[in-house]
Structure formats: structure tokens, C-alpha cells
Amino acid sequence: MNANPIRIALIATTLVLATTGTAHAAGCLKGAVVGGVAGHYAGHHAVVGAVGGCIVGRHLAKQHAQQQTAQRQAAQTQ
């Protein structure tokens, strides 16, 4: 069976999401898909791209959540 790199990336992402739970998955799935596709076209490194995309997506989601929290707190103090 010839394993498609994108299929492997999606399986790996699914396993990561299944083990980490929904609280830690914000941004990971979207980043993993984008990173997997980009990695595939940039030299057949879909799995590496998916892992990197997951990490970046999670980081950006965390920053976005912190910004929203800061905005809510600023609105409450006014």
C-alpha cells in the first residue's frame, strides 16, 4: 500500500487531536491542513508541514484568545 503524505499528515493530526483533547486543539487542525498541503508542494514534506502548521496555528489561536481577553477586560473597566 502506497501511503499518500497528505493522508499520513491527516492521520497524524487526528491522533494528536484525539490525545490532546479539544481544549488544546484550537488552531491546530486548520494549521495542520494548511501546513501539510504547503509542505507537500514544497518538497514532499507534508508531515513536517502539518506538525509545523499545528504548532503555529495553536500559537496564533492562543495569541488571539489573549487579545480578546484583554479587550473584554478593558471594556469592563470603562
Image (spheres, rainbow, N blue to C red):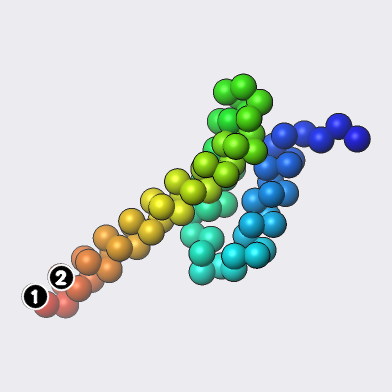
Q: How many marks?
A: 2
Q: Write the residue at 64% across / 57% down.
A: 16
Q: Write the residue at 66% across / 26% down.
A: 44
User: On the picture, is 54 further left or further right than 14?
Assistant: left
Extreme top residue here?
43
Q: Write the residue at 60% across / 37% down.
A: 48
Nearer the observer, 34 or 19: 19
Rendered location of residue 52, percent (x, y): 52, 42
Near mark 2 (Cα within 10 A), the count class, few <14, some 14-19 or many ≥20, is few
User: On the picture, is 53 further left or further right than 1?
Assistant: left
Residue position marked by numbered label 1 in the rendering: 78
Rendered location of residue 77, percent (x, y): 11, 77
Q: Which three-letter amino acid code belongs to the residue tagged 2?
A: Ala
Q: Which mark is residue 74?
A: 2
**Alpha-carbon span between mark 1 and mark 2:** 7 Å
Extreme left residue here?
78
Rendered location of residue 7, percent (x, y): 74, 40
User: On the picture, is 68 further left or further right than 61?
Assistant: left
- Image marks 1 and 2: residues in contact by CB distance under 8 Å: yes
User: On the picture, is 57 further left or further right than 29?
Assistant: left
Is any atom of residue 5 visible in this view?
Answer: yes
